[in-house]
Amino acid sequence: MTDTNINTPIIPTWCPGCFNFQILAAVKNVINEELKKGKTKNDFALVSGIGCHGKIFDYVNLNGINTLHGRVLPTCMGIRVGNPNLTVLGFSGDGDCYAEGMEHLIHTARYNPDVKYFVHNNQVFALTAGQPTPVTEIGYKDKTTPLGVKLYPMNPIKLMLAAGCGFVARVYAEKGQVESVFKEALKHKGFAFIEVIQPSVIFHTDEEYKTKFYSLEKEGHDKTNFEKAWKKAEEFDYNIVNKIPLGIFYQKEKPMFEDLWPQLVELKKKKMSWKDIRR
Ligand SMILES: Cc1ncc(C[n+]2csc(CCOP(=O)(O)OP(=O)(O)O)c2C)c(N)n1
């Protein structure tokens, strides 16, 4: 019988009420649905970085790599190049992605490998006790920044649009939202960037955010229109809390890295499993 159990016996060490639990539940639900539809566990690879988010690796029983801090995307890319048939899922924190891993993010958007990438954005380096990241709001104080953050936060949605990413989305860390964007990302051929607003229950509160969210889809946003996506991206930058658009900002399929190289096209035809790679 095929093994379809993606649970692990490891008890999560996330804080009680952490929004990472919502992301975990959503990811497992969608993978379970894929397994029911005929995929096997060997069709997936899961990569996570270092931080609270990175523990997701311990809680989903799939092959993969809990990689170095900031190196989720090159690891995902390496796995795709080694076996272009795998569904590769990457998980980073905002520190992991926007600080140490920033250059990889830009190049991966440009290379466009078929990788689905989730950024658990809690606006701090949470595991190391709440230091500010490039998306922390001005004024935020911690032991390392007693005078408060003075630098303006970066806008990851605008960055991804500018870098040529063909699937740019932001959701709130609520199970249903993560599930539905994940399903759309799986249908998309190419790199999918999914920022998940995941308020830290220790260092931030989500109360103010919650009242500002609205759905791009319900508003009739045209996700094929780059200029409109850019305008929507400008509405929220982690500092000015005005309206916060959620959903898919932009979607356009472009040639994937794996399809541009004849060697990789040949490799894809071989339909290898993990077993073949180990040999
Ligand atoms: C190369 C390297 N630099 C720094 C660290 C220290 N470190 C471990 S976890 C962490 C914070 C991670 O923050 P983030 O990626 O935002 O994840 P979160 O804990 O918030 O989920 C840092 C800086 C490390 N382990 N390796």
Image (spheres, helix red, strand yellow):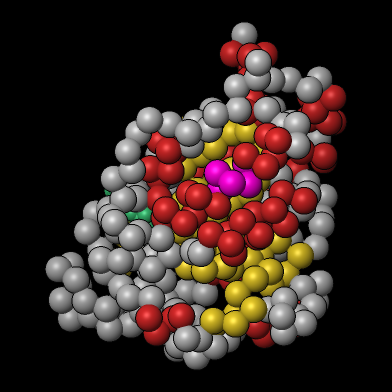
Above or below — where is 80 with respect to 102?
Answer: above
* Residue at left offset 63%, top offset 47%: 30
| Point 60% across, 74% down: residue | 246
Say left or right for 79 vs 24.
right
On-image quarter of the C terminus: top right
Q: Position of residue 217 (x, y in %)?
A: 72, 76
Q: Is residue 36 above or below residue 249?
A: above
Q: Is residue 153 magenta?
A: no
Q: Which residue is the extreme one toward the top? A: 279
Q: Which residues are magenta?
A: 27-31
> Residue 220 occupies which quadrant of the picture?
bottom right
Can you give x and y, in whole percent of width and height, for residue 103 in the image? 52, 55
Task: From the viewer's perspective, tell me whether residue 138 is left or right of residue 107.
Answer: left
Residue 27 drawn at (x, y percent): 56, 48
Q: Residue at x 49, y 54 (%)?
A: 23
- Where residue 87 appears, as percent x and y from the top left, is 67, 37
Residue 255 in sight in this render? yes
Q: Main secondary structure of the magenta part?
A: helix
Q: Is residue 97 visible?
A: no
The quadrant of the image that shows the N terminus is top right
Which residue occupies the foreground of this view, 89 or 38?
Answer: 38
Question: How many numbered circles does the render carry?
Answer: 0
Q: Is residue 102 left or right of residue 259?
A: left
